[in-house]
Image (cartoon, grey):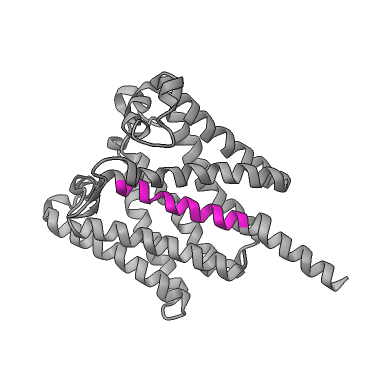
Amino acid sequence: MTLQQTENLVTALIAFSFSVLGLTFLLGANPNALITTFNFYSLGAMVSESALGAITGITLLLLALMTFAARFKLVSPKTVTLFAALVTAIPLLTLLSSGRWMADLGGFPIIGSGQGIIKYFAVLPLFLFLFYRDKLSHKQLTYLNFAPVAMVLLWIGSMKFFEFEANAIVGLVETSPFMSWLYDVFSVQGASNVIGGFDVFFALVLGVGIYTKNKPMIITSGIACLSVFLMTQTFLFSVPDTFNSATIVNRLGQFVIKDLWFVANLVVVAYFTIFNSVSDQNRKTQLD
């Protein structure tokens, strides 16, 4: 994969995901999430639900459009990166609210509604890759893009060992043509443990592979991590009513579509640890 192909794929994943999110909010999906976010800033009571949806939807659509425009040098890279930082900071700061954590299970780090929020950590490293690649080293960009992948797999993966999370994913697993067999072999908690163990194990192995520059380890664990985020995309089709004719996707669909950011993170990691190093070696061979 060349640099241009990597940039194009990352840009497409960002633009597509934010376009879908923007349209769903613009069309009125998941108003409770918006109210929770805006209430954190004491703005929820000042604006109607429809206005919150319109503001959020237009903002996310604008970010998608600006990302494409910046790739063609129609918008300043600094402008779109700062805008992306602002857009992602708004939900991320709500993690400071106790409402994101499950108080009856001890609060932090037992996360409830914040599971969808922490995914926004994946976004800014992608913009740094696209527009600030010359100011950061390959190693820095690799770890910046690996960090959110590791965080979400370790964090949400670890949650799978709790009963509340095992029960929460039943509706996803039992309707999946790729995962429903787990309930034929394991109990609800056992299946959840297997899924969580897979997430945690391969996140750790990928980290070790990157640190030791072990390409076979990076490829194997990278594919495994990628499969997690690609698998979640199948829930859009396997879980009933995820697609909505009125708002494109429902709350679950919004949660799932964010995993495309982690696919992009892994593409960046692969470029710097596998494809780019291969290109460097080929250039060295030609010079010799």
Which portion, as a residue range, is magenta?
253-270
Residue visible at 23% across and 44% down in the picture: 241
- Asked if residue 115 lies left or right of residue 225, the reply is left
> Which quarter of the image is occupied by the C terminus?
bottom right
- Residue 148, image x and y in percent? 50, 47
Q: Quadrant of residue 103?
A: top left
Nearest to the observer: residue 100 or residue 129: 129
Tell which of 7 and 212 is nearer to you. Answer: 7
| Quarter of the N terminus within the rendering | bottom right
Residue 218: within the magenta?
no
Q: Position of residue 49 (x, y in %)?
A: 13, 53
Numbered label tally:
0
Image vertical order of residue 55 relative to residue 101, above or below = below
Going 83% across and 71% down the picture, which residue do you hit?
A: 286
Coordinates of residue 32 in the picture (x, y in percent) = 19, 45
Q: Main secondary structure of the magenta part?
A: helix
Q: Is residue 278 left or right of residue 169?
A: right
Q: Residue at x 55, y 52 (%)?
A: 266
Q: Residue 257: percent from the left, percent from the top?
A: 36, 51
